[in-house]
Amino acid sequence: MNRKEILRMLVNHFFIIYTCTMFATILFCSLNDPKTTEIDVSFLGYAGIFSLCADLPTLVYLSDKELTKKGWWIRTAIHTGLLEIVLLTVGYKLGMYSGVLGFVLFFGMIIFVDAIVRLVTYVNDISTAEKINGQLKKRRGDIEGRGTK
C-alpha cells in the first residue's frame, strides 16, 4: 500500500470507529450506570483520542504483498490483542471505566465495536469491488466490441 491508500484507510476507519464509539458509549453508560442521562461535551474530544488510538492497530494489516488466509488470521489475532490492550489502557486513563464490572463491559464493547467496524468495512469493500468489476466488464465489452469490427 502506498501512503495515500494508507491515509485513506485510516481516515475512513477513524470515522467509522468514532461513530461506533459514540453509539457504544450510550450503550455502555446505560449498562454500567443507568442513572447517567447526559454526557459532558468534553467527552467528544476523549472519544476522538480514543478513536485515533483504536485506528492505529489497523497498521498490522499493511503489507506490500497479498495476505494468505493464514496470514490474515494471524494479523487479525494480533490486531484484536493490540486493540484490547491499547483501548483498555487508554479507556482507563481517560476515565471511561472503573472496577471489574466496568472492565468486563468495556472489554465486551471493544469486541462489539470491532465487529461492527469490520462489518462496515467489509460492506464498503464489497461495494468498491463491485464497482471495479463493473468497470472492468464494461471495458472488456468495449475492447471485444472493437475487436469484432
Image: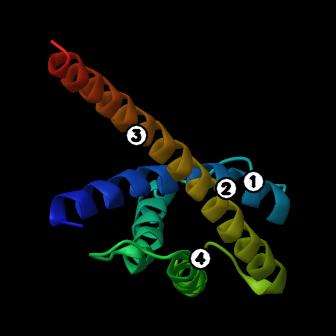
Is the residue under label 1 in contact with that under label 2 (CB below 8 Å)? yes
Q: Which residue is mark 1?
A: 27
- Label 3 and label 2: CA atoms lie apart by 27 Å
To which residue does mark 3 refer? 128
N-terminal-most mark, 3 or 4: 4
Residue at 17% over, 22% down = 147
Which secondary structure lies at badge 4? loop
Nearest the viewer among 64 and 37 is 64
Tell me the distance, in whole angstroms, between the alpha carbons under discs 4 and 1. 16 Å
First in sequence, mark 4 or 2: give its number: 2
Residue type, numbered disc 3: Thr
User: Which mark is drawn over residue 95?
Assistant: 4
Place of residue 121 in the rendered image (x, y in percent of width and height, measured from the top left): 51, 51
Mark 1 / mark 3, whichever is N-terminal: 1
Which one is closest to the eye, mark 3 or mark 2? 3
Q: The C terminus is located in which quarter?
A: top left
Secondary structure of residue under mark 2: helix
Q: Residue at x 26, y 75 (%)?
A: 64
* Residue 24: assigned label: 2
Q: CA distance from mark 4 to mark 2?
A: 15 Å
Q: Nearer the viewer, residue 107 or 142?
A: 142
Location of residue 96 in the rendering, given as x and y in whole percent from the top left corner? 62, 72
How many tags in the picture?
A: 4
Asked if marks 1 and 3 touch (Cβ < 8 Å), the reply is no
Callout 4 amino acid: Gly
For marks 4 and 1, the one nearer the N-term is 1
Residue at horizontal 50%, vertical 57%?
Answer: 17
Q: Secondary structure at mark 3?
A: helix
